[in-house]
Image: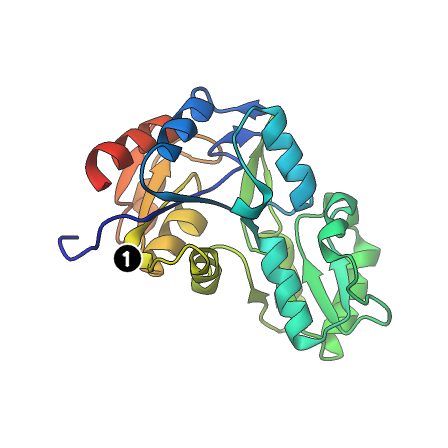
Amino acid sequence: MASRRALKAVLIDLSGTLHVEDAAVPGAQEALSRLRQASVAVKFVTNTTKECKRDLLERLQRLHFDVQETEIFTSLSAARSLLEQKGHRPLLLVEESALEDFRGIDTSEPNAVVVGLAPDHFDYQTLNQAFRLLLGGAPLIAVHKGRYYRRGDGLALGPGPFVAGLEYAADCRATVVGKPEKSFFTQALADLGCSPSEAVMIGDDVRDDVAGAQDAGMLGVLVRTGKYRTGDEAKIHPPPHLTCDSFPQAVEHVLENLL
């Protein structure tokens, strides 16, 4: 790491790192305030697909996090950009609360399938409709392929298993737009004016947050909150730059060692 340039940006995951549903990680608000006082840019990057960016921002502000809408980059934003670039008319398998981020997108006579986290839509009839579209040549777009995430009542299935099921049934491969895709991280960094070698990612998902960031050329810091499970550090190579108990400890490391 001796060849790395001075740190200019910190990318921060949201669900599982700063909060779990409507409960903030202890000390996370104060740690974020300390980070903001340093000479480093901050951006929040999330695979959350359960709610639109506006609802997500309102949740964070209710939890007293100092966050602005322009600082949030979501996998829903990346999915919308791809749909607009390709001119696709999607069948949207996302929750009603996330539809706002696709407002204005033509969904008549779908010629593409977009899968996010949509428990209310993962029924046989809807998945079979998606399957038939895929058999007819429609592309499969995964907002992300997270295996699971942390809810207030414990771990829960993410969209990944449903994406994998559609891939298997239709003998196709999804285009993934969220973490851990390299393009997601480079898009998030683009308006911060820094390269991956000048950034660090803090998150609770060893594959999507940490491995994805490190594959893109960033440092990855894993936190033992949210979806973290004992032994996650050993699931990727190279291992995380650092594993911390929580976001506040990760911020301490950034402030003391990386700036």
Q: Residue furthest top?
A: 26
Q: For the residue marked with disc 1, what is the amino acid?
A: Ser
Residue 175 vertical position relative to residue 143 in the rendered view, above or below: below
Which residue is found at the position 68% from the left and 42% from the top?
54
Q: Nearer the viewer, residue 82 or 33?
A: 33
Q: Quarter-wise, where is residue 12 in the image?
A: top left
Check disc 1 and report the residue beneath it.
197
Q: Residue at x 71, y 53 (%)?
A: 101
Occupied quadrant, residue 56: top right
Query: Residue 19: image x %, image y %?
Result: 53, 29
The one of 201 and 161 positioned closer to us in this rendering = 201
Q: From the viewer's perspective, is residue 54 above or below residue 161?
A: above
Answer above or below: position of 15 versus 179. above
Which residue in the rendered view is the most extreme toward the bottom? 137
Left or right of residue 107: residue 163: left
Question: In this rendering, does residue 27 appear at all?
Answer: yes
Residue drawn at the location 58% of the way across and 71% of the way down: 173
Instruction: Name the spot of residue 82 as percent of width and height, x first.
Output: 62, 68
- Comparing 157 with 112, the one in front is 112
The picture places residue 37, in percent across and down from the top left corner, at 36, 32
- Give the residue drawn at x 53%, y 57%: 178
